[in-house]
Image: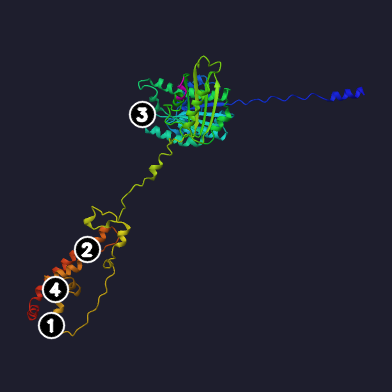
Amino acid sequence: MAKKIKKVLKIKKPLPEPEKEKVKKTKIRVVGIGGGGGNIVSELAQRVKKASFLAANTDLQALKEVSRKVGRFPFGQSWTSGLGTGMNPEIAETAGQNEKERIKKILQGQDLVIFIACLGGGTGSGAAPIFAKISQNLGNLTYGIFALPFKFEGERKMEIAKKALESLRPKLNAITILPNERIFQIIDKTTPLKEAFSAINKSLAQSLEGLIETIYQPGLINIDFADLRTILEGRGRLAYLNTLSFPKKEGTAKEAAEKALASPLYPYGIKGAKGVLFNIVGEKGLSLEEVSRISKTISEKTHKDAKIIFGIQPLSSERRAEYQNIIKTTIFATGCPTKIFSSEAPKKSRRRKIERPVEKPVDYYPPSTLQSQPSRPKKEEIKSLPKVKKLKSKKPEKKLPVRQPETKESSEAAALLPPKDSLSRAPAKRGDEQSSAIKKEAPLVLEETSRQNSGTQVKIRKNALQIKKEIEEAEREFLEKEKIWEAPAFLRRKNKI
């Protein structure tokens, strides 16, 4: 029996212990595109930790100036020969299209990709949409921070920047816009240019640092990458990012929160935002009242159905000396309803209808009215006008006269008389008959001129001047024949003989 038991014990083996689940580390990559984007990333890398930085440019000389903490990604050398694009976004776009596989490699395996560029030039405006599209196809959360050019840089640069924004918007989860013109809100105009740009970069670095710390640093009320993913849901949502530090005093919490919500570098705020993530960092003695005031001030500005996620973190051992008696608040809001994109502005201009004069045929107006054409009448006026039957091109049918027995005298007189139709136009006498003939023709003239002035398109065979000329010719012929009719018939016969 003992031997059998030993065999059974040998068969049984201890079960392996379950492996401890490893917490996935969030990977964040910040990519600066173009000369301006590379300069900003170089300064961010000096302050922000726990994120990788990369500068992408066609200009090899500009890449040499980038900080050592920043990786270099040259592209498009076959198109630019290692130079810039000369403010031509199409060259940068073509260069990016030909380097898709290389771009894909630097963006693979990232959880969050942040693109930074100064729009209005060539490389940043042309290549940024290509980088963003590749990141979107890889399934990365994609966030863009873009600076707009100064007004003194000209309208051409601003147009390039607007077109780039239109192309970038559907390829990003969220987008932040910082006009360079807003720099005058925080510095004096006499400040040197390098210091001015450094001030913007410092403010941006502080905000990004606060956002990354919020994700990585554990807290009393913790915020992780899943919360950030919730806020970044959607496409092309306008985002607001700001971090503000203020001294810990009574009554300063609400005032400081209001300042954090109204950064002078932004042309918009968080009013009506549909997603808000904010984090409060302070000492262990942070009171509930201070947290409540800050939270209430922020929630009042957002949309009533907004997703609000907040966290509270104690100061780390590294930052206790730096942030002693100081409260730091980081706010990241998306879905701000402000209309800032160029694609929304031109809609009004498309609706405008330019009224142009309708071109009409030249023979429509008589010579006397060609210089000042009458305005087009309304449809109601055209309908109310009487139809002029006399203006038809068809000739009236002539009634044949009844023949009477001819005598020698009547036949001789008839030979000398003018045709019957001319006699109907001209009067028999210079007085009453002449005026009656003119009155018969006058309605025609009045009707024709009224039709011309009304603006209806009717082809007129004769104008008033032509009719008047015909009347004068008929009158002249009649007067010449009248000299013959005044003499008696026998005298006319002698004259003829």
Q: Amino acid at mark 4?
A: Ala
Compute the Cα span from label 4 to label 3: 87 Å
For the residues labelled 2 and 1, the Cα–Cα distance comes to 43 Å
Dot placed on the residue nearer the N-terminal end, 4 or 3? 3
Quadrant where the N terminus lies? top right
Q: Dot 2: what SS?
A: helix
Q: Tell me the CA gap for discs 1 and 3.
A: 103 Å
Q: Residue furthest right?
A: 1
Residue to which mark 1 is pinned: 409
Residue hosting label 4: 428
Q: Which mark is residue 446?
A: 2
Q: Amino acid at mark 1?
A: Glu
Q: Which residue is mark 3?
A: 152
Place of residue 169 in the rendered image (x, y in percent of width and height, measured from the top left) = 48, 35
Q: CA distance from mark 4 to mark 2?
A: 24 Å
Determine if residue 72 is in view: no
Disc number lying in front (2 or 1): 2
Identify the residue at the far top of this view.
321
Is residue 372 visible from the viewing direction of this image?
yes
Residue 496 location (% of width, % of height): 9, 78
Front of the two marks 1 and 3: 3
Numbered disc in front, either 4 or 2: 2
